[in-house]
Amino acid sequence: MNEAVVNLVKERGFEINDSLSEYIEIWKSWYQGEVEGFHNYKVYNGKDFSELTRASLQLGKTMTEQIANLLFNEKCSIVVANESSQEFLEKVFDHNNMYIKLNESQEKKSAFGTMCYIPYFAIDTIKMNYVSAENLIPLSWENGVINELAVYSRVWSEGEEYIFVQLFTVQENSREYQIENLLLKDDDIVPLSDVAGFSDVEETVHTGSESKPFVIDRLNIANNIDPENPLGIAIFANAIDSMRFVDIVWDSYLNEFVLGKKRVMVSSEATDMRDGQPVFDPNDLVYYQLPEGLNLDGHPFIHEINMTLRSADHQQALQQALNTFSSQCGLGENFFRYQSGSLATATQVMSENNTMFRTLKKHEIVLEAALVDLVRLILEIGQRHNLHPGLDLEAKITVTFDDSIIENKDVELARRMQEVAAGLIRPELYLAYRYGVTEEQAKEMMPGMGTLVPDDEIDEKE
């Protein structure tokens, strides 16, 4: 946490729980793929310390990318059961490139444990801020639900660095939210009007609403580091040792080929010129010429060093390490497979992994609630500023996730077709599933069913 922001928050009378700050920095280093003291380390060779860099499979990045792609991708849909509201939502999503940004946010959420979405009104439109846990300070919470919040970020204006802080707090009398915007230079508050680019930013915004002006999104994993802290934990928070294991094995595997390189040790006397030409090609790296005088029993010699590579042992150890890591992340042992010299990921093994299915469904519960809250907040801001006519804040919001890589569609279609043939389900139900349409639309797709007789007329005829 930024010390200046922490001091500011404490001056406002809020208590700070910074128990996760150190862990967030650790998760960040694994996400970036360079952990000080582990990937950069020293080894004593008996004479000097050698500075080395350990090779990495970058699992902190790879795992979070995979989770993000599984949780929210271009096949996910958010539908509001009100035409005007849906039209406005699509406009906001397109303007802010939100499908891409939400996918990125799922990746950061998996890496840092928590993401915050902040839609705000700006010049006749709605814009979005996405803030990860490293820049969030919960101010008040109840049963793990954050009610008041401080977010901050580094900004630059005319070559000067500032800290931009937003405090989302509840007014005691009205219970409505207000947003306080502040700029810090070192430990001092700087008037917004004095800084280029911030002169139009209001110091205090009264939302006039009891709805939170931010949405918290976190993984559906219990915080076992500090259960009292409302922030979430990274997908790999309890798998750090497994990530170390993977990179140790991977580094050793690569070194096996470096250290096991074939060499031919040649004494200096054996490299004499013959007929004006060198006996050995000086550019051939397989040969290593020994200093003059090093020979075998007074005779020139050529000695081959051909190390045996332990490839099978390394591959087995690497797979065991990957299995342990993916299992600790809640995705089963087959999330990663090292085979044929490459790392196969979830898309190849999804349909056979029930553990992964259950874990993703668990995470979707929290994500769905966060997306619904975000959509309602966008609609509320749009209605408050008259950005679009006919917005309905009570309309049903449906979030549909992409399960195509979880379910085996071909197998499911074949099974449903068999059920139709056996008379167990109606044909229109099969068509509705196959083409993603409503039951009525499926009926119209059926041969000879272009004109349907209403059910009440059928009842009257009977």
Image (spheres, rainbow, N blue to C red):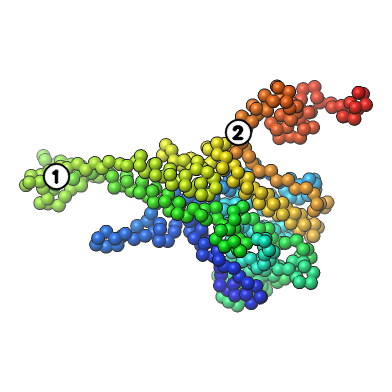
- Asked which quadrant contains residue 457, the reply is top right
Q: Give me the residue at 75% from left, 70% from top.
A: 171
Query: Residue 118's x, y, as percent?
Result: 67, 59
The image quadrant where one finds the C terminus is: top right
Amino acid residing under circle 2: Asn
Q: Nearer the viewer, residue 114 or 81?
A: 114
Q: Residue at x 72, y 51 (%)?
A: 372
Which callout, 1 or 2, points to the residue nearer the camera?
2
> Which residue corresponds to mark 1?
271
Give the x, y percent position of residue 414.
64, 26
Q: Which of 280 and 43 lies nearest the eye of the viewer?
A: 43
Please say if the residues under marks 1 and 2 sit with CB atoms less than 8 Å apart. no
Q: Residue furthest right?
A: 460
101 or 15, nearer to the observer: 15
Q: Is residue 97 visible?
A: no
- Residue to which mark 2 is pinned: 408
Q: Is residue 378 left or right of residue 55?
A: right
* Residue drawn at (51%, 58%) of the image: 27
Q: Is residue 391 above or below residue 306?
A: below
The secondary element bearing badge 1 is classed as helix
On the image, which quarter does residue 197 sit in?
A: bottom right
Residue 114 bears which disc, if any?
none
In three-dimensional space, the C-alpha distance between marks 1 and 2, rounded to whole angstroms, equals 65 Å
